[in-house]
Image (cartoon, rainbow, N blue to C red):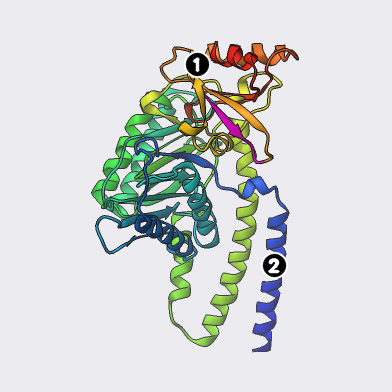
Amino acid sequence: MDGTIFTMASTYSFFILLLLSFKSLDTKAQSPNYMGDDCHNTTQKSLSSAYQTNLNSILSWLSTDAATSKGYNHSIFGNNASDAVYGLYDCRGDIVGYFCQFCVSTAVRELLQRCPNRASGFIWYDFCMLKYSNENFFGNVTVYPTWHVAGTKEVSSAKEIQKGQDFMRSLIRKATVETNQLFYMDGFNLSYTQKRYGLVQCSRDLTNQGCRQCLETMLAQISKCCEQKLGWFAGSASCLIKYDEYRFYLFHNESSSGAIRQIAKPGRDKRSKILIISFSVVGSITLLCFSIYCFWFRKRTKKDGLTPPIIRLSSYQNVQTEETLNTDLPTMPLITILQSTDNFSEASKLGEGGFGPVYKGILPNGRQIAVKRLSQTSGQGSEEFKNEVMFIAKLQHRNLVRLLACCLEENEKILVYEYLSNSSLDFHLFG
């Protein structure tokens, strides 16, 4: 007995040390990657106090429930049809426990900021998704809008493309027919020296047939954007598929459920103690591996180009990202701009220019800014926008309004200027 206590105490100490080492890693590496949201299909409106209360309650409940090992759940809050809120979270099949909750908690916080005063909302991260609505969406298959991202490396041959497609189809079959898990991850040997890895997953409120339909739709869309690339990713509010040259998931399918099943089995005391100790050690090692994985994954994806912004297939175009502007001009996160302008509210609007509206914003430090948001119908393309950014950034004359930053996230083209009330602002922004 004493030996067991000592071993468990040692394991606990080791676990704490791992937590401390996890904390010491780059903070940004711990945050889940934002992939996209779908708030544009719903309009802002005044929500009833009852609906707002139910919304806050269900989001809090989903965040708390995500700490369980299930990795998925859904619920309804509200007794009346007029103020009922339907909510769901679903973590990736290899993400459970604390890491699932961390992702869902982040999603809850960001969803309220990105989709304020909306009766429904959806947000998606690399490790989880979160959705709520005033209508019952449980079991419904949603394949549009579709998001995708592709790596920068090219495949070596058409034969490799076909092998990758066949491999992903086999994962779809395993997820929907052979295992009924609605997710599956695995790898295969492309050659003696090369391996490829894939993952498929559906929101677990779907039927097997609905899941298969969604995944096959995603795979069919890949031919429109990404099949020539070595790594790619596509997904919707109901499912996702991912394929790459490196192993991006945490463990194989057997590991994700086998350990939990073993702990749940009753047995003799001695066997239970061994299982508890073993599971503690495995959990500690998993935590360390996860922290290293997060740190490495960030560095790897940035290097290979398999990073957001996610591009909707419905509006696919070759848009320059902020990393390719080749200027010394800083970039400003879209979420910061949204917060500073109250989500581009009418109250913040200064006027309408030749290329789109301009808004007044206030940064967290109190600094006032003017935000020029290029209209989708303005006719100014990516090259024109890039040229304008580079031209103004090089000028920066004291007699001209100063350009502070730009933003090219989520198909937005935004310029951030210093806010001045004189005529030079009108000339520079509205001319």
Question: Could you say which is closer to the camera, residue 120 or residue 205?
Answer: 120
Among all residues in the image, which is located at the extreme right?
A: 398
Residue 162, image x, y percentages: 38, 29
Residue 235: x percent and y percent? 39, 39
Q: CA–CA distance between discs 2 and 1?
A: 57 Å
Can you tell which mark lies on residue 195? Answer: none
Amino acid on which the number 2 mark rests in the picture: Ile
- State the extent of the magenta-drawn residues as a range: 358-364
| Predominant secondary structure, magenta span | strand
Which badge, 2 or 1, comes first in the chain's sequence?
Answer: 2
Q: Is residue 213 left or right of residue 218?
A: left
> Image point 49% across, 59% down: which residue?
96
Residue farthest along the front direction in this orientation: 422
Secondary structure beneath label 1? loop
Q: Which residue is mark 1?
A: 353
Label 2, on which residue?
16
Tell me the quarter of the image containing the N terminus: bottom right
Q: Which marked residue is nearer to the observer: mark 2 or mark 1?
A: 1
Q: Amino acid at mark 1?
A: Gly
Whether 85 is drawn above or below 335: the answer is: below
Image: 10 above or below 27: below
Secondary element under disc 2, as helix, strand or loop, is helix
- For the C terminus, the image quarter is top right
Q: Is residue 47 magenta?
A: no
Residue 418 at x, y percent in the picture = 66, 25
* Circle 2 crowding by C-alpha within 10 Å: few under 14, some 14–19, many from 20: few
Q: Of 360 and 149, which appears nearest the observer?
A: 360
Task: Check whether the beta carbons of the residues at disc 2 and disc 1 lie within 8 A of each other.
Answer: no
Between 286 and 383, the one lying in front of the other is: 383
Q: Viewer-proximal residue, 230 or 321?
A: 321
> Up-down: is 111 above or below 40?
below
